[in-house]
Amino acid sequence: MESIIIASKGEGKLKENWKYCIGTGRLGLALQKEYLDHLKIVQEKIGFKYIRGHGLLSDDVGIYREMKIGEEVKPFYNFTYIDRIFDSFLELNLRPFIEFGFMPELLSSGDQTIFYWKGNVTPPSDYQKWSNLITAVVNHFIERYGIEEVKQWPFEVWNEPNLVNFWKDADKEEYFKLYKVTALAIKAVNQDLQVGGPAICGGADEWIVDFLNFCHRENVPVDFVSRHAYTSLSPKKVTPDYYYQDLVDNTEMLQQFEVVRGLIKESPFSDLPFHITEYNTSYSPINPVHDTPLNAAYLARILSEGGDFVDSFSYWTFSDVFEEADVPKALFHGGFGLMALHSIPKPTFHLFAFFNRLGEEVLYRDTQMIITRKENGSIALVAWNEVMAKGEGFEKKLVIKIPVSSAEYFMKRQSIDENHANPWKVWKELGRPRFPDKQSVETLKEAAIPKLSTAKQKKEADGCLKLLITLTKNEVTLIELKAIKDEPQTYEGLDDSLITSYSS
């Protein structure tokens, strides 16, 4: 049993970098009802500030079109869908974290695409037309939402250009050209707009060094650096339905954050903000690990410590309404989302919701726990027991002593683990129905609720509350402590012992 004694003095403020941004499937999905239903739930329980997704300029959103007027073909910029999409985001207190991509077919230089929905990943056939498109889009946003609002939107150029799947031939010099043309077009509209990149995935950090040196050498604007982070190894097995991978230790992700922060500090732009615009365990949208309690327990330390190194880190994604690998073929299919289809919260959803209940002042933090105090004096802590080994057991026992001022506290504890708030387990017990009936969906929603326990805790002679906690395998628990203001004296004739089966 591990004993932890908390000092009465805090260790600083809890950064909210973990909830700065959330990822989404392609923006065109925001026209679907279930997508918006999920987003409303996520915002009510967590409350992210920004949302980032692919496909702003892809043909399903329909911004770039061409019209023939007489004998001349001219661009026509159609903002019907993107206005509807961004209006929906802003109504939910979400600002867009813009990603410029992919290439409209009429502007593309080739037919290479990615994903089921065929995002074109080739450079523009005409860079002047591309520049004009960027100018028109940014001007429209300003006209619709106002310059003071749009100045708060980061503009990121492309997505993972270091991969041949996302950018033709992973041509670095061609990407730098695209970035320069795009950044100059944005800044020509208003110098105060934020533009950055290169939005690479891990394993190619030399791109960041070369990118920043290019911007310095060519006097190209850059206001932030972006990168992605995943911690899965090469696949062990790939089937039509699933993609299986092992995970490295979660400290590897924190090391990725720290290393790139160091590269930025050594660059000509040493003080640039650093945004992780995608992260998760696996980079595959059909990896079952995303549906498990392990995914939540594994990422708890990332939420706790990631803000030490990066200005934001954006979980990929909020919803399983997502179609990179085709329309989802089953309710639980290993999707990235915090929310499964039919509005069923996954364990990782609750991890984020638990962190959202933490206070502003950090009293204590280690590799398995964070303890905070709120402005009203109440205490909130999140603890976790990440276990990547197979089998049963692996319980962890903790004794936590927290100095407090009041005599008695109400303790509320919510937990997720292998047997609680694990609808994936219940789905398997139901026989893994691909398309469950309404009764089964209701059962799965009931199975997605965290375990709840409550108790009255008294301050001990040493001035501390003593918490005895047992964490089961892959458990994440939220404990909230609120001083009791007992009011039995306000009830005339109160006597619980007069109730059959009860005592005072």
Image (tube, rainbow, N blue to C red):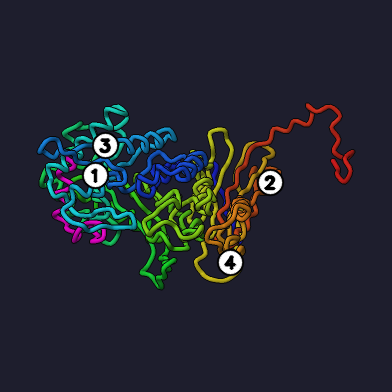
Q: Nearer the viewer, mark 3 or mark 4?
A: 3
Disc with the residue nearer the chain's start (2 vs 4): 4
Residue type marked 1: Gly
Q: Nearer the viewer, mark 1 or mark 2?
A: 1
Q: Residues within 10 Å of mark 4 (few under 14, many from 20)?
A: some
Q: CA distance from mark 4 to mark 1?
A: 44 Å
**Image quarter (top left, top right, bottom left or bottom right) of the N terminus:** bottom right
Q: CA distance from mark 2 to mark 4?
A: 24 Å
Disc with the residue nearer the chain's start (1 vs 3): 3
Prevailing secondary structure class for the magenta stretch in the rendered image: helix
Residue type marked 4: Phe
Residue 78 marker = 3
Q: Which residue is mark 2?
A: 454
Residue 496 marker = none
Question: Could you say which quadrant of the image residue 493 lies in?
Answer: top right
Stretch of the chain drawn in magenta: 162-184
Check if residue 176 falls in the magenta segment. Answer: yes
Residue 201 picture location, percent across and down: 29, 57
Dot 1 lies on which element? strand
Dot 3 lies on which element? loop
Residue type marked 3: Asn
Residue 196 marker = 1
Q: CA distance from mark 3 to mark 4?
A: 57 Å
**Nearest to the observer: residue 213 or residue 75:** 75
